[in-house]
Structures are given as C-alpha cells and as structure tokens.
Image: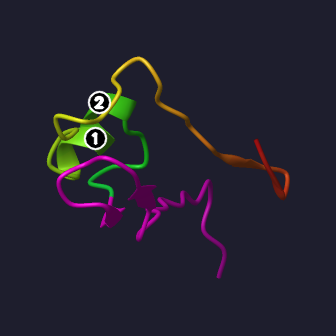
C-alpha cells in the first residue's frame, strides 16, 4: 500500500540562547520560537544593568561550524 503525496511536518525543539555580561540574570535560555531578536533575548535575561553599555552589544552565531 502506498500513500499518494504524503506530507511531513517538523518542529525543532530546544533552541537556546546564551546571554552574558551586564544583564540582571545572565545564562542560557530556551527560546519560545526558532527566531528571536536581540532585544527579546536581553529582556529574557532581565534587561541590561545600569552599568551595561547599550551601544556595545556583541552577537556571536555559529555558521557552518564557525563562530562569527
């Protein structure tokens, strides 16, 4: 027996983002979706502290096994 035009739905689980530095709660957080903005990640960590420099935020992501 064969199924004509089968479909597959995939969900990715356990996306994580790490927020370090001058934030209220630095650490690793589970992302609610596979896409997240920098501001959402910072808010998950409780926002920047008073000493945090808002003009100097660094994003590191892995592309093809290399961190950029």
| Crowd around label 2: few <14 · some 14–19 · many ≥20 (10 Å) | few
- Left or right relative to 39: residue 2: right
- Find out whether the residues at labels 1 and 2 contact each other: C-beta distance under 8 Å: yes
Residue beneath the point at 39% across and 51% down? 21
**Front residue (pair 53, 57):** 53
Q: Is residue 6 magenta?
A: yes
The tag on residue 24 is none
Q: Secondary structure at mark 1?
A: helix
Q: Would you identify the image quadrant in which residue 7 lies?
A: bottom right
Task: Measure the C-alpha gap from mark 1 to mark 2.
Answer: 5 Å
The image quadrant where one finds the N terminus is bottom right
Q: Is residue 27 magenta?
A: yes
**Front residue (pair 18, 13):** 18
Residue 22 location in percent, x, y?
A: 31, 47
Q: Would you identify the image quadrant in which residue 41 lies?
A: top left
**Front residue (pair 32, 6):** 32
Residue closest to the far bottom: 1
Residue closest to the far top: 55
Residue 37 can be seen, yes or no? no
Residue beneath the point at 30% across and 61% down? 26
What range of the chain is rendered magenta? 1-30
> According to the image, label 1 marks what residue?
42
The image quadrant where one finds the C terminus is top right
> Secondary structure of the magenta portion, mostly?
loop
> According to the image, label 2 marks what residue?
39
- Left or right relative to 64: residue 68: left
Residue 65 location in percent, x, y?
A: 84, 58
- Left or right relative to 20: residue 10: right
């Amino acid at each position: 027996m064969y199924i004509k035009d089968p479909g597959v739905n995939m969900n990715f689980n356990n996306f994580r983002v790490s927020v370090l530095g001058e934030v209220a709660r630095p650490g690793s957080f589970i992302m609610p979706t596979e896409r997240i903005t920098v501001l959402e990640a910072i808010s998950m960590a409780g926002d920047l502290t008073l000493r945090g420099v808002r003009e100097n935020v660094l994003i590191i992501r892995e592309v093809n096994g290399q961190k950029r």
